[in-house]
Image (cartoon, grey):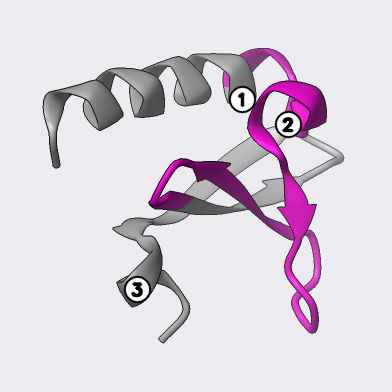
């Protein structure tokens, strides 16, 4: 992953630690057909993650370029 994306991904992880759905900054969208599963868009990078709302726990499923993320 290029350095400029890696830095932004780390910042996104820090934002997730504070708020499981930081919508304005990262264009968070819920993934259809999956319960409590979301994606963050950072340029061509997609971060797919799940949220356990009761415990406010975040599970990162994938950090991929868009072309590979939705396969």
Q: Which residue is mark 2?
A: 20
> Would you call the spot at circle 1 few (<14 residues within 10 Å), some (14-19), or many (20 or more)?
some
Residue 57 position, x and y percent, is 65, 36
Q: Residue furthest right?
A: 54
Task: Identify the element where label 2 is drawn.
Answer: loop
- Using the image, determine if residue 6 lies above or below residue 38: above
In front: label 3 or label 1: 3
Residue in the foreground of this view, choosing between 6 and 52: 6
**Contact (CB < 8 A) between labels 2 and 1?**
yes
Q: Which residue is mark 1?
A: 16
Residue 62 position, x and y percent, is 39, 58
Q: Residue at x 72, y 43 (%)?
A: 28
Identify the image quadrant of residue 53: top right
Q: Residue at x 32, y 58 (%)?
A: 64
- Using the image, determine if residue 50 lies above or below residue 68: above
Q: Earlier in the sequence, mark 3 or mark 2?
A: 2
- Using the image, determine if residue 39 lies above or below residue 27: below
Q: Residue at x 38, y 29 (%)?
A: 9
Task: Identify the element where label 3 is drawn.
Answer: helix
Residue 52 position, x and y percent, is 75, 47
In front: label 3 or label 2: 3
Q: Earlier in the sequence, mark 3 or mark 1?
A: 1
32 left or right, relative to 70: right
The quadrant of the rendering that contains the C terminus is: bottom left
**Contact (CB < 8 A) between labels 3 and 1?**
no
Identify the image quadrant of residue 68: bottom left
Report the disc number at residue 67: 3
- Using the image, determine if residue 3 lies above or below residue 66: above
The CA span between labels 2 and 1 is: 5 Å
The CA span between labels 3 and 1 is: 23 Å
Q: Which residues are magenta?
A: 17-46
């Amino acid at each position: 992953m290029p350095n400029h994306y890696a830095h932004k991904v780390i910042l996104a992880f820090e934002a997730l630690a504070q708020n499981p759905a930081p919508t304005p900054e990262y264009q968070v969208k819920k993934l259809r057909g999956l319960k409590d599963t979301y994606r963050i868009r950072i340029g061509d990078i997609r971060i797919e993650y799940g949220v356990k709302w009761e415990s406010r726990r975040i599970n990162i499923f994938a950090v991929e370029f868009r072309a590979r993320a939705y396969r």
